[in-house]
Amino acid sequence: MKDFFYAIQDLFVNVLFAPLDALRELELENWWAANIMNWLFVIIGFVAFVYWMGQLKKFNNNNEEDKSISSHSYL
């Protein structure tokens, strides 16, 4: 049974965390490249934000939103 847990340890430490170890070593050489995943998430979030604002503007220009005070029953 002990070998089973050592196998799990070996899998995680030597195989699954290898990309993270590579990023950790890369950080000493180039901080920007080491944070590439963070930059990708920021860019994706920014693109989604711009798209969402464009959709809101499109619906606002078409006057499709019900802006009356009693538009929701709980108001």
Image: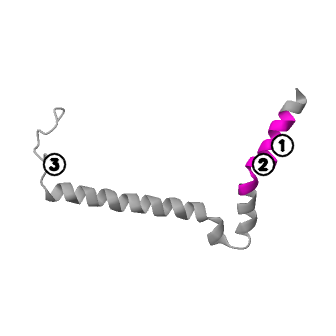
Where does the image place residue 10, in percent across and percent down from the top left?
Answer: 83, 43
User: Which residue is labeled 1 in the image?
Assistant: 10
User: Which residue is labeled 2 in the image?
Assistant: 15
Where does the image place residue 39, in percent across and percent down from the top left?
Answer: 54, 64
Which type of secondary structure does the marked residue at label 1 adopt?
helix
Give the residue displayed 73% in from the left and 73% down from the top: 29
Q: Residue furthest bottom?
A: 29
Which type of secondary structure does the marked residue at label 3 adopt?
loop
The span from disc 3 to disc 2 (Cα, nearest Å) is 52 Å
The span from disc 2 to disc 1 (Cα, nearest Å) is 7 Å
Where does the image place residue 49, in percent across and percent down from the top left?
Answer: 37, 59
Tags 2 and 1 touching, CB below 8 Å: yes
Left or right: where does residue 41 sit relative to residue 9?
Answer: left
Q: Amino acid at mark 1?
A: Asp
Q: Would you call the spot at circle 2 few (<14 residues within 10 Å), some (14-19), or many (20 or more)?
A: few
Q: Which residues are magenta?
A: 5-19
Q: Earlier in the sequence, mark 2 or mark 1?
A: 1
User: Which residue is labeled 3 in the image?
Assistant: 65
Give the residue displayed 46% in from the left and 60% down from the top: 44
Residue 50 - label: none
Q: Would you call the spot at circle 1 few (<14 residues within 10 Å), some (14-19), or many (20 or more)?
A: few
Q: Amino acid at mark 2?
A: Val
Q: Amino acid at mark 3?
A: Glu
Quadrant that contains the N terminus: top right
Question: Which SS does the magenta portion mostly show?
Answer: helix
The span from disc 3 to disc 1 (Cα, nearest Å) is 57 Å
Tags 3 and 2 touching, CB below 8 Å: no
Q: Is residue 7 magenta?
A: yes
Foreground of the two, 75 or 28:
28
Q: Would you call the spot at circle 3 few (<14 residues within 10 Å), some (14-19), or many (20 or more)?
A: few
Quadrant that contains the C terminus: top left
